[in-house]
Amino acid sequence: MNMAQTTQQGTDPHRGGATQWGSRARRLAQLVLTIGLTLLGLLAVTFFIGRLMPIDPVVAIIGEQADQAAYQTVYHQLGLDKPLPVQFFIYARSIFSGDFGFSLTTGNPVAEDLWRVWPATMELATLALVLGVLAGVPLGIIAAICQNSVWDHLVRLFSLIGHSIPNFWLGLMALVVFYAKLGWIGGAGRTSMQFIDALDPVTGSILLDSLLARRWDMLADALRHVIMPALILASGSMAFLSRMTRSFMLEQLNQEYIVTAKLKGLGTAGLVAHAMRNIGVQLVTIVVLSYGGLLDGAVLTETVFAWPGFGRYMTTGLMNGDMNVTLACVFLVGTIFITMNLCADALYRILDPRTR
């Protein structure tokens, strides 16, 4: 009787479902705890970076000509007279409530400034990612199929160059050649002067807003401005994706199932299709991580092309000693990387059931 009861309990679907839900709840709790601790650690790093930087936030606000009484008043208002643990608690409470303080450069709340400049970076990074995938993945496949051929060596040379040449140098050369000499691309900024504030922003992306408004002249002008910074920003992504795709493809092309398919007379296109099914998960993962790198790696590109995005905003704040802007941007960059890693991990589990 006891054995029967034990067997019945072991095969009870309700008990099995409860156990499964309990396991999922524990994993979710572990994930939330990990994210919380990571963000808290990132917050601590940004806080102490702000305290260690040789910039006096009081002087940055009131100027060097202010008297000692004004200095002490602002010093007290900023809470700098409190112990460091108390300062960190106040800082963390403000950040997690969405209050990044005010920018000394613009005079606006930093959160509003970030909301304003972020669509420009999203537009540039998204187009750069699309270009990187469209060029990098096919180049990697060609290099793998033509291993040790001239095409393979050219792709590997391109990958090396893409990782070696700084974006700011490529941007300056592109402006000199394609804008100043040939006039093929637009100049600095997102649009020409006549199109500035020509449309009420809907999505924040000039390409999408002009497309929705059917302003084809504005769309063409925006494309002339965005194509070169997007290509410059995409150069590193192209190089990375081509190298990784080549590596993934070479690993699959040496597998037994590919050799068997080749012996059965399957053509090159069929072999590539077979291999792509097995490297798709890996490619999706590195594409997601590349997108995170593009979002926060556009600092130099945006500076060279005067692109009014997140990277240029962060650079301007750093140069002006605007600590609220600098720390908020550092925290946002870290949050982006955490989010992209979580998305990559989630996609990996969704696309590959073996990892669940």
Image (spheres, rainbow, N blue to C red):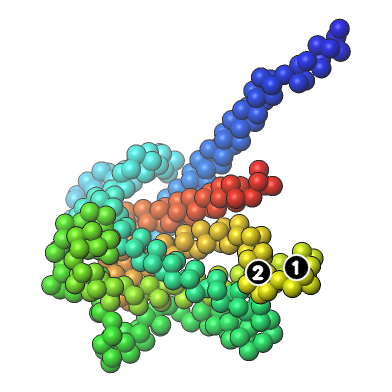
Locate residue 133, reporting x and y percent: 49, 68
Q: Does 258 appear above or below 20? A: below
- Residue at image mark 2: 270
Q: Is residue 263 left or right of residue 43?
A: right
Residue contact at pointers 2 and 1, CB within 8 angstroms: yes
- Residue at image mark 1: 261
**SS assignment at label 2:** helix
Locate residue 94, reporting x and y percent: 34, 41
Which of marks 1 and 2 precedes in the sequence?
1
Q: Quadrant of residue 322?
A: bottom left
Locate residue 146, reporting x and y percent: 66, 82
Q: Quadrant of residue 21?
A: top right
Residue at 46 percent of width and 79 percent of height: 166
Quadrant where the image shows the C terminus: top right
Residue at 63 percent of width and 83 percent of height: 152
Locate residue 198, reporting x and y percent: 14, 64
